[in-house]
Every structure is written in C-alpha cells, then in structure tokens.
Amino acid sequence: QVQLQESGPRLVKPSETLSLTCTVSGGSIINNIDYWGWVRQPPGKGLEWIGSVHHTGGTYFAPSLRSRVTLSVDTSKNHFSLKLTSVTAADTADYYCACYHYSSGSYYFDPWGQGTRVTVSS
Amino acid sequence: DIQMTQSPSSLSASVGDRVTITCRASQSINIYLNWYQVTPGKAPKLLIYGATSLQSGVPSRFSGSGTGTHFTLTISSLQPEDFATYYCQNSHSPLALSFGGGTKVEIK
C-alpha cells in the first residue's frame, strides 16, 4: 500500500523559498500513468492545486502559481519535491502531497500525505 | 480554466438526515469529477471518482451523480463521522485541475 509523507521546514521567512519533499513508500514513484501532486489549504480556506509532476520530469502548474513553483522528482530516493519562491504570508497553508492516480478511466488524488503546516513569518 | 462552484457553502444537519451537495462546472467535464472529504488534522479522503464510482472502503451511504456540468454528492443517512468539509474536483484534464470552494457540513 502506497504511503506518502511530507517533510521540510515549517517556518519560512517572507521573500524566501519554501521547500518540501514528499517521500513515497510501499510503491515506486516510477509509474508511467500516475502523476505526483501538491495541494495546499490556507487556514480557513479551500483546497488549491499547486502542480503535478511525472517521474519523467514533465511538470504542470496552477496558472496563479506557475511563475514561482518548481517541481522535481528523484527516482533514486523515491521522492518528489516542491519549491515555492518569494513567499508571503498568503502562502501560509497546510501543504499536502498526493498521488494523482489513474484508474477505471479517471484521474484522482489518492493516497494523500498527512500534510504539513508551513507558516510564512519573520 | 474550468471553474467549479459548490453549493451550499455550508449546511447544518442532524444525524440520520439525507444531505445533498451540488457542484457545477463552468463548462462540460463529462464525468471527470471527484469528491473528497476533509476533516481537520486528517489527510483528505477520496470518496467518489468518475462522478459516480465509490472508492473502495467508503461507506455506501455516499453516492455521486451527474454528468456534463451538474454533479451531486449525496449522503443518504448522515453519521457523526461525516461532519466535515466536502470538495469537488475537476479531473477533465489531468494537467489543469481545480477544486470547488467546499461545503462544510455542521451539526444542527
């Protein structure tokens, strides 16, 4: 059973770069069909898709975040990473990694990591 | 971009009630619509994919319907563990995703 776990600093200063890693266990990140994604939820607000990455390196981003986001995959470590530059308080959120899985004709996020709260503050 | 609009944004209901949540897409997304349950402190949970398919392990009181631009999530008999926030998600294009604004189900 595939499990995901986010890791990284929980406090980031304004204007700096937020960096998170999602480690995949119980399965391989090398999967020709699935993507690996990031979703965030600011306090009191809804879910927001950040972007998705394929193990081959193909990346796709939410238009509103495209200019600040970098996604990458390290197949040797079975993990994928998120970098968000020039952060502000508006980037404070619970950050989730998830598998964007394809089955029975549909893509959906499952499973998810437990999430990690990242706070942007000086 | 495809916009997803959920209604209501919140509702109050009692244990045993039938609850229906609506999600509308700004353009047709066929059946490419998923539903998730989000509870504070827990990972989001997939309930329904492909508009109507129940994810393995999800209780049968949850059901989804719809196609095109209009979708619904129904909980046939609300249980205490169902008080949570529910989100729809457009999966029409795997590469340009969007979530609805969420519907918070609260105890009446």
Image: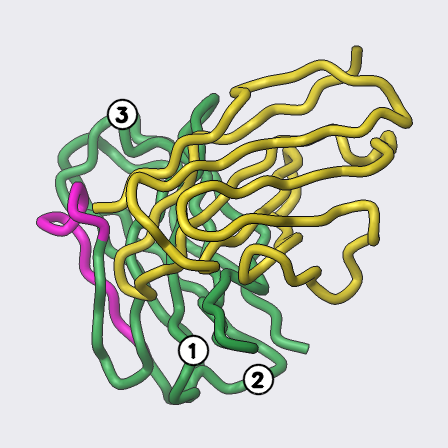
Q: Does the magenta run of residues contain A63?
A: yes
Amino acid type assigned to the residue bearing label 1 in the image: Asp
- Return the disc, 1 or 3, that comes first in the chain's sequence: 1
| Residue situated furthest left in the rendering | A67
Q: Chain of mark 2?
A: A
Q: Chain of mark 3?
A: A
Q: Which amino acid, by three-letter code, is at mark 3?
A: Ala
Q: Type of residue at label 2?
A: Gly
Who comes first in sequence, dot 3 or dot 2? 2
Quarter of the figure with residue A97: bottom left
- Residue A34 vs A76, above or below: the answer is above
Task: Characterize the local packing of mark 1: few (<14), some (14-19) or many (20 or more) Cα atoms within 10 angstroms.
Answer: many
Question: In the figure, the yellow chain has which letter?
Answer: B
Q: Quadrant of the C terminus of chain A?
A: top left
Confirm or deny contact between disc 1 and disc 3 (CB under 8 A): no
Q: Residue at x 53, y 53 (%)?
A: B34
Q: Nearer the viewer, residue B85 or B18?
A: B18
**Label 3, residues with CA under 10 Å away: few <14, some 14-19, many ≥20:** some
The residue at which mark 3 appears reads as: A89
Instruction: State the mark number for residue A34.
Output: 1
**Residues at discs 3 and 2 in contact (Cβ within 8 Å):** no
> Which colour represents chain A?
green
Question: Between residues B20 and A61, which one lies in front from this camera angle?
Answer: B20
Q: Residues within 10 Å of mark 2 (few under 14, many from 20)?
A: few
- Residue at which label 2 appears: A27
Which of the two discs, 2 and 1, labels the residue nearer the N terminus? Answer: 2
Q: Residue A52 placed where, x, y %?
A: 31, 64
Tally the marks.
Answer: 3
Determine if the magenta segment contains residue A101.
no
Cα distance in 3D space between marks 2 and 1 = 12 Å
